[in-house]
Amino acid sequence: MTLRGAGFWPRAARAAMVVFLVIVATLLVRYARAIDWGRVLETLAEYRAGELVMAAVLAATSFLFYCSYDLTARRYTQHTLPTLRVMAIAFVSYVMSLNLGALIGGGGFRLRLYSHAGLSPGRIMRVAGFSVFTNWLGYAVLAGAVLAGGWLSVPADWPVTPFAMKAAGAVLVGSAVAYLVACATLHGRHLRIRGHVFHLPTLPMGVLQTVLACCNWLVIAGIPYLLLRGQIEYPVVLGVLLLSGIAAAMVHVPAGIGVLEAVFIAMLDDRLPRFEILAALLAYRAVYYLAPLLLALPMFFSLEAHYRIGRTRAARDARSPPA
């Protein structure tokens, strides 16, 4: 009996996804039953204004880094949209990606807003691809360093050995290094995918991508570290956040609801009471997901209104007789 690769692998991926979702759901139910929700609310009420302000500053810094991805992509794709317009589109797109998922949020909103700004679909695709790749490039470097350095220990009942984790870390760091080597040696060569042409950036731009994304992930990890009040070592918080990030990306759950909590509780259950972990994550969601969403929505409608006004004005000018 033979298996056709085109049919077998999609079915295997779907089966693995179902298994992963079942595992996450099981963990959520088990943890939810064991959490003292009254203590969670009490812990949330104990956060001082200064702590929340500092968390908000870190969140704002992270979104500035996200905007820098699209600004770097502007240079990569050589379009000429104004800086503030690019930053507004990037901010709305990344906030929607975090809250609604990458396809609907980041992809759909970026396509709509950049199209309204006058970019072609091909150029928008290159901007989006460059920005997404930049984000995961930084992820690979940091996750690889955490795993290879042995800073993250998984629960004893997980079927993952320390050697496997270090090997995975080495592969991640190696992939990032290979990309930079390719930028240095293959810059200028073109790759055609589904009718779209891509080319590797220069080595300085590749290094810039890596630095920006690494800084962004480091800043993001600073938010739960701050809200956990330094009770867990920063490299451990960074490693758990990175692990939850890839888990949320795998299951495509909007805002990673449940996945983030399940991973943090599973990894830190022996270090802190569950109600403290959950309180920190709820505060993290309020600062990093909900508050930016409340800013992004009016910004999106403002961009839409600006586009509609411009289109109406252009149509009126086209109908006006020449002087």
Image: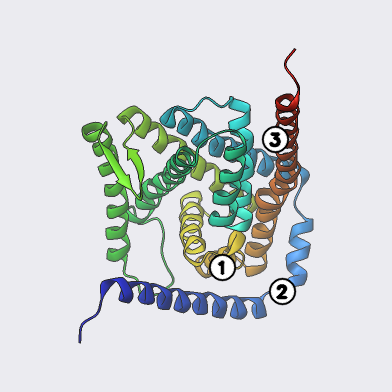
Give whichever of discs 2 and 3 has the lower sequence position: 2
Q: Amino acid at mark 3?
A: Tyr
Image position, residue 102 (x, y; %): 54, 54
Q: Please indicate, yes or no, whether residue 21 appears anywhere in the rendered image.
A: yes
Image position, residue 86 (x, y; %): 58, 32
Please identify the quarter of the rendering in which residue 45 is found: bottom right
Please identify the quarter of the rendering in which residue 104 is found: bottom right
Q: Amino acid at mark 1?
A: Ile
Which of the image's four quarters has the N terminus? bottom left
Query: Total number of numbered labels?
Result: 3
* As drawn, 121 above or below 154: above
Which of the image's four quarters has the C terminus? top right
Q: Please indicate, yes or no, whether residue 176 appears anywhere in the rendered image.
A: no
**In this figure, which residue is indicated by the disc labeled 1?**
265
The circle on residue 36 is 2
* Measured Cα–Cα span from mark 2 to mark 1: 13 Å
Which secondary structure lies at badge 3? helix
Give whichever of discs 3 and 1 has the lower sequence position: 1
Q: How is the image coloured?
A: rainbow
* Measured Cα–Cα span from mark 2 to mark 3: 49 Å
**In this figure, which residue is indicated by the disc labeled 3?**
307
